[in-house]
């Protein structure tokens, strides 16, 4: 268990209850309190282009977006928020606007004159990140905090005067050198960075703010939010500020949707989250139906029954460690005991794809459920679990179908009560004939990702099966993509790709697709595609290589978080990236293409 394991981030890990917060007003919209979970997004247009910003905002609102964010890189750019706001009001649109601020306190001061909310990033609002490594004395540390206060208090006072809201939004990729050197590149560092700003705000009796703890790695994101809420609980009841959820740089397509669902859904399961943004490397209007579906799927768990018991969890919610089980062999396939997490399918689905197993590439089924000897139990049945625990031989165990329990709560209860030596088979839904209320693939994808991804990020699960998606090929692809997004089983290239915004220095969508086309066969290589430097170097700490906009039409290439190639013309940059991968002996030639389901 970690040093934080005595903290609690939700009242009951085995039953849904939404976290109670104060309400924060953002113009006409209330966040937290008794309000529904709000859906928001961000414009991809240049904030200096009033007509395009108005057009995109109206499209987002028509799609159901409730809060719209724009970037404001400088004070001069922030001045145009006045024009954008006036133009929207002239068209009868009073959607609340949020100015996204990095590096420039004077831009925040200008933005707060015109928009309902200002987002500040504690990692770069005042601090200038240089990746410097040094020890801070308490006096030096206090001196830098005092400098933050000097720059931040005027914004707090202006927000008080104009009744503006604020998001204190930490990003894993842009923690300050001071925080990094005192607390490390950790969830604790993210939390402490935000709390520094919150303490200043509270000292001036300003409370109209929300927190966020965004990261591209779902495990880091989940742990950071949990730790934040636990720390807020520890600080006292009046620290009940609402929470903005998001996985930053999630990417595009199914991968971006799955990664977002794992991170956001895990927290919604525990009643955490009052407003969400799904960050996709696509036109922002496509984020809205995904976010709406996430909220709908996330709230559905409230209708499930209670697990009825609250045993001590067998996992640490604040620090990932895979549950230690014994190794079994099932139909010749090793499982548990440190083996990779296996993919199950039903006999019917196996039979449906048996004629083309060799063509399924990386999406092959590995074990047939009906032939596995898995033991299915109700985790509330103490006698059945005691019987398993009294036997010396390890067994593969799962939760029975047809129970009135949310899968996450059911499998948590099973993991808490079952001896560790028994491996666990996770299910996305607790019925082989279950279909989500909206039986489209997106709903199945989000349900499976939220349920199984959450458990995998807690180290629970030695095998998985998707039951909610009927199509055999799609259910297998979904299984493997969930394992990849959770960081559990890497079988293909992993991409960290930010969504477009007004800071972006190249077309992220087309560039990401070009990079995928050139590198998509490099299994286990992690590539970051970043439109600018705001989060680029930091979020690339977990990546092997990075492609980052350095100036209009110019690209910088990174190895890890170190820039190694500068000002490369954009039309040459993808080829130079592949050359860089070759230089570091991570390149292999693409295999002959095979059909995938």
Image: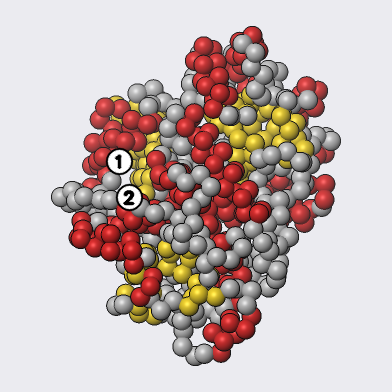
Please give the name of the residue rendered at 42% of the width and 32% of the height, measured from the top-left corner. 282
Residue 115 locus on image (x, y percent): 67, 21
Is 540 drawn above or below residue 488 in the view shown?
above
For the residue labelled by badge 2, is the local secondary structure a helix, a strand or a loop?
Answer: loop
Q: Nearer the viewer, residue 153 or 402?
A: 402
Q: Nearer the viewer, residue 564 or 266?
A: 266
**Residue that carries the numbered disc 2 in the rendered image:** 493
Image point (73%, 25%), residue name: 28
Is residue 336 visible to the viewer in this orientation of the structure? yes
Question: Is 238 in front, or is 554?
Answer: 238
Residue 552 place in picture, x, y as percent:
39, 22
Spatial separation of the CA atoms under disc 2 and disc 1: 8 Å
User: Is residue 501 in view from this perspective?
Assistant: no
State left or right for residue 237 relative to residue 524.
right
- Quadrant of residue 388 in the image? bottom right
Is label 2 in contact with label 1 (beta carbons under 8 Å)? yes
16 vs 539: above or below? below
Q: Which mark is residue 516?
A: 1
Classify 10 Å Cα crowding around label 2: few (below 14), some (14-19), many (20 and above): some
Residue at the extreme left: 592
């Amino acid at each position: 268990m970690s040093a934080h394991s005595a903290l609690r981030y939700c009242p009951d890990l085995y039953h849904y209850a939404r976290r109670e917060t104060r309400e924060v007003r953002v113009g006409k919209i209330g966040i937290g309190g008794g309000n529904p979970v709000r859906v928001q997004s961000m414009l991809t247009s240049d904030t200096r282009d009033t007509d395009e910003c108005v057009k995109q905002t109206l499209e987002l609102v028509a799609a159901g977006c409730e809060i719209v964010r724009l970037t404001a890189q400088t004070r001069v750019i922030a001045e145009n928020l006045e024009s954008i706001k006036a133009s929207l009001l002239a068209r009868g649109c009073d959607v609340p606007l949020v100015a996204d601020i990095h590096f420039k306190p004077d831009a925040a001061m200008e933005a707060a004159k015109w928009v309902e909310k200002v987002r500040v990033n504690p990692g770069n609002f005042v601090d200038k990140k240089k990746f410097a490594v040094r020890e801070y004395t308490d006096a030096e540390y206090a001196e830098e905090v005092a400098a933050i206060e000097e720059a931040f208090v005027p914004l707090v006072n202006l927000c008080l005067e104009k009744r503006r809201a604020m998001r204190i939004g930490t990003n894993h990729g842009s923690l300050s050198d001071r925080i990094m050197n005192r607390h490390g590149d950790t969830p604790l560092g993210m939390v402490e960075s935000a709390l520094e700003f919150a303490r200043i705000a509270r000292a001036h009796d300003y409370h109209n703010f929300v927190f966020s703890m965004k990261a591209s790695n779902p495990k880091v994101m989940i742990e950071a939010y949990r730790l934040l809420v636990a720390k807020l609980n520890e600080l006292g009841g009046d620290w009940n500020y609402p929470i903005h959820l998001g996985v930053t740089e999630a990417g595009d397509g199914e991968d971006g949707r799955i990664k977002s669902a794992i991170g956001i859904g895990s927290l919604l399961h525990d009643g955490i989250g009052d407003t969400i943004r799904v960050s996709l490397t696509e036109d922002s209007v496509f984020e809205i139906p995904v976010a709406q579906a996430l909220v709908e799927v996330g709230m559905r768990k409230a209708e499930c029954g209670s697990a009825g018991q609250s045993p001590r969890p067998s996992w640490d919610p604040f620090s990932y460690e895979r549950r230690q089980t014994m190794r079994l062999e099932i139909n010749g396939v090793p499982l548990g005991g440190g083996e990779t997490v296996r993919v199950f399918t039903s006999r019917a689905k196996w039979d449906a794809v048996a004629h083309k197993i060799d063509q399924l590439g990386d999406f092959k089924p590995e074990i047939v459920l009906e032939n596995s000897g898995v033991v299915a139990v109700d985790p509330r049945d103490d006698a059945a679990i005691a019987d398993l625990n009294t036997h010396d031989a390890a067994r593969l165990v799962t939760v029975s179908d047809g129970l009135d329990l949310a899968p996450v709560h059911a499998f948590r209860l099973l993991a808490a009560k079952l001896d560790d030596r028994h491996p666990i088979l996770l299910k996305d839904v607790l019925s082989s004939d279950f279909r989500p209320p909206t039986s489209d693939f997106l709903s199945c994808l989000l349900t499976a990702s939220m349920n199984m991804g959450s458990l995998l990020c807690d180290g629970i699960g030695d095998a998985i099966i998707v039951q909610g998606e009927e199509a055999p090929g799609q259910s297998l692809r979904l299984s493997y993509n969930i394992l990849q997004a959770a960081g559990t089983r890497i079988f293909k290239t992993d991409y960290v790709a930010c969504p477009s915004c007004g800071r972006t220095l190249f077309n992220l969508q087309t560039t990401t697709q070009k990079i995928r086309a050139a590198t998509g066969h490099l299994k286990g290589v992690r590539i970051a595609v970043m439109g600018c430097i705001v989060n680029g170097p930091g979020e690339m700490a977990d990546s092997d290589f990075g492609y980052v906009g350095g100036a209009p039409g110019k690209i910088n290439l990174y190895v890890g978080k170190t820039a190694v190639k500068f000002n490369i013309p954009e039309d040459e940059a993808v080829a130079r990236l592949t050359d860089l991968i070759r230089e570091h002996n991570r390149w292999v030639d693409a295999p002959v293409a095979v059909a995938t389901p």
